[in-house]
Image (cartoon, grey):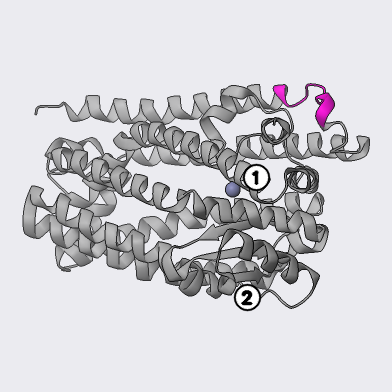
């Protein structure tokens, strides 16, 4: 293949800038669409005051998205345009005599820390100013910063192992790296799916078994009916960070778990919580976890397959300001060029996920009851100040869950 590095650079910058324009245009359209009158079925979700608050919340987040997004766009375009990646790489090469793998780990480590330093003030502001203002924030300064440190350590450990393995295979095997690394990453994805709630999440949240009482009895009765083993239902202290409520299903085999946030339990009736539990069991019974696991493994395979075609081309390094082939820089160039493909695959994943949500809702309705699920979903939308009238195209691209109105319609249909 013969590509002019200059042309490649222009393509990369154009992808970044067009992506930004596309995203901002779409979120503007969505913001405007969100101000439409609330549909009749959902009139009871918000009080008038709460509805005004939800509009204000969206407007604030929209503005914030503009500021943080523009800042990161400018920094990225400047850094790429001025050959920052090439500069950093040649600085490391001329000042340190590490092996290429260590060189690569240091290179990515510096970039990771730099990008985190840039984004931290924004996430701090989002948590302590915006979420605080709308009454969602429960995170203390201490939690915020210890999360950060834990995240760094975890990122260094897991990222270091995976990136080290990738670089090792690239240097040792050439283009054959792709299928061996695919096996490595597959093992990693399966491992993380099985142990995420046992090994990773407890670093950030406290897990407690659901205590005896009316709720446990109700869930036990339901579990017996649908033949779901109840050993693995947990409550986590979501209230440590936010008032926003949630529930999820994770893992498979002996490691499967239903996790309810304490914030969910606080605000919902026993019937509503059992309906939410039934929804999560639906994800298990309909094999959604395995389905999305297989899809993400296939996607990774596709990415690695395309990567092997590009990763050894010196033009990719030259486009980002290096003189000759650098595998580290090529990993960056590749990820930039791959971003449109991954965006398209992300849309596919969202379509799959929304279909799963309808199925899980339907499962909860047929095995338990639809009514309490409807009231639970309404309460959640109100408590989280959700957008009741998102733009359909925005939903199609970005939503992993169908909008409230669609879920209620499907649950109410016989
Ligand atoms: Zn769900």
Residue 46: % across, % down = 86, 38
As drawn, is 146 to the left or to the right of 194?
A: right
Res 206 label: 2
Residues at marks 1 and 2 touching, judged by CB atoms closer than 8 Å: no
Q: Residue at x 54, y 34 (%)?
A: 398
Q: Say which mark, if any, is on residue 22.
A: none
Asked whether the viewer can see residue 291, the reply is yes
Residue at 86% x, 35% y is: 52
Residue 30 within the magenta-colored segment of the rendering: no
Q: What residue span does the magenta drawing correspond to?
A: 33-41
List the single residue furthest toward the right. 48
Q: Cα distance, mark 1 to mark 2?
A: 33 Å
Q: Residue at x 10, y 58 (%)?
A: 171
Q: Is residue 264 above or below residue 130?
A: below
Q: Earlier in the sequence, mark 1 or mark 2?
A: 2
Viewer-closest of 112 and 191: 191
Image x and y of residue 249, in percent: 55, 58
Q: Is mark 2 within 8 Å of ligand 1?
A: no
Give the SS element for disc 2: loop
- Quadrant of the snapshot with the N terminus: top left
Q: Position of residue 233 (x, y in %)?
A: 61, 69
**Which mark's residue is nearer the viewer, 1 or 2?**
1
Secondary structure of residue under mark 1 = helix
Q: Is residue 386 above or below residue 122?
A: above
Q: Which mark is residue 366?
A: 1
Q: Residues within 10 Å of mark 2 (few under 14, many from 20)?
A: few
Quadrant showing the C terminus: top right
Report the front residue among 252 and 403.
252
Whether the magenta-drawn stretch holds residue 37 is answered as yes
Q: Quadrant of residue 49?
A: top right
For residue 95, say whether it is visible: no
Can you say whether 292 is above or below 103 in the image?
above
């Amino acid at each position: 293949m013969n590509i002019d590095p200059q042309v490649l650079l222009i393509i990369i910058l154009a992808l970044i800038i067009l992506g930004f324009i596309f995203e901002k245009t779409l979120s503007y359209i969505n913001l405007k669409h969100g101000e439409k009158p609330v549909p009749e079925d959902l009139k009871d979700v918000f009080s008038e005051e709460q509805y005004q608050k939800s509009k204000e919340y969206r407007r604030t987040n929209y503005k914030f998205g503009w500021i943080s997004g523009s800042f990161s766009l400018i920094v990225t375009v400047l850094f790429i345009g001025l050959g920052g990646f090439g500069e950093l790489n040649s600085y490391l090469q001329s000042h340190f005599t590490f092996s290429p793998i260590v060189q690569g780990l240091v290179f990515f480590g510096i970039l990771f820390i730099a990008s985190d330093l840039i984004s931290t003030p924004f996430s701090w502001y989002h948590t302590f100013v915006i979420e605080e203002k709308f009454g969602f924030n429960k995170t203390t300064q201490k939690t915020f910063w210890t999360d950060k440190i834990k995240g760094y350590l975890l990122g260094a450990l897991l990222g270091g192992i995976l990136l080290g393995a990738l670089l090792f295979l690239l240097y040792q095997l050439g283009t054959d790296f792709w299928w061996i690394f695919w096996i490595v990453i597959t093992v990693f994805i399966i491992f993380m799916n099985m142990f995420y709630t046992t090994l990773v999440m407890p670093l950030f949240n406290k897990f407690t078994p659901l205590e005896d009482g009316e709720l446990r009895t109700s869930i036990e009765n339901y579990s017996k009916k649908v033949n779901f083993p109840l050993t693995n239902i947990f409550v986590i202290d979501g209230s440590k960070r936010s008032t926003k409520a949630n529930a999820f299903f994770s893992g498979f085999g002996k490691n499967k778990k239903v996790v309810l946030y304490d914030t969910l339990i606080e605000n919902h009736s026993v019937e509503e919580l059992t309906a939410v539990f039934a929804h999560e069991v639906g994800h298990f019974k309909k094999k959604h976890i395995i389905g999305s696991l297989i899809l993400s493994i296939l996607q990774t395979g596709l990415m690695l397959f395309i990567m092997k075609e590009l990763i050894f081309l010196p033009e990719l390094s030259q486009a980002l300001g290096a003189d000759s082939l650098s595998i580290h820089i090529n990993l960056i160039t590749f990820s930039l060029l791959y971003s449109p493909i991954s965006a398209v695959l992300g849309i596919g994943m969202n379509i799959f996920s929304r279909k799963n949500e309808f199925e899980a809702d339907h499962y909860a309705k047929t095995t338990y009851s639809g009514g309490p699920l409807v009231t639970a979903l309404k309460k959640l939308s109100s408590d989280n100040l959700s957008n009741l009238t998102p733009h359909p195209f925005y939903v199609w691209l970005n939503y992993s869950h169908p909008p409230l109105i669609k879920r209620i319609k499907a649950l109410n249909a016989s």
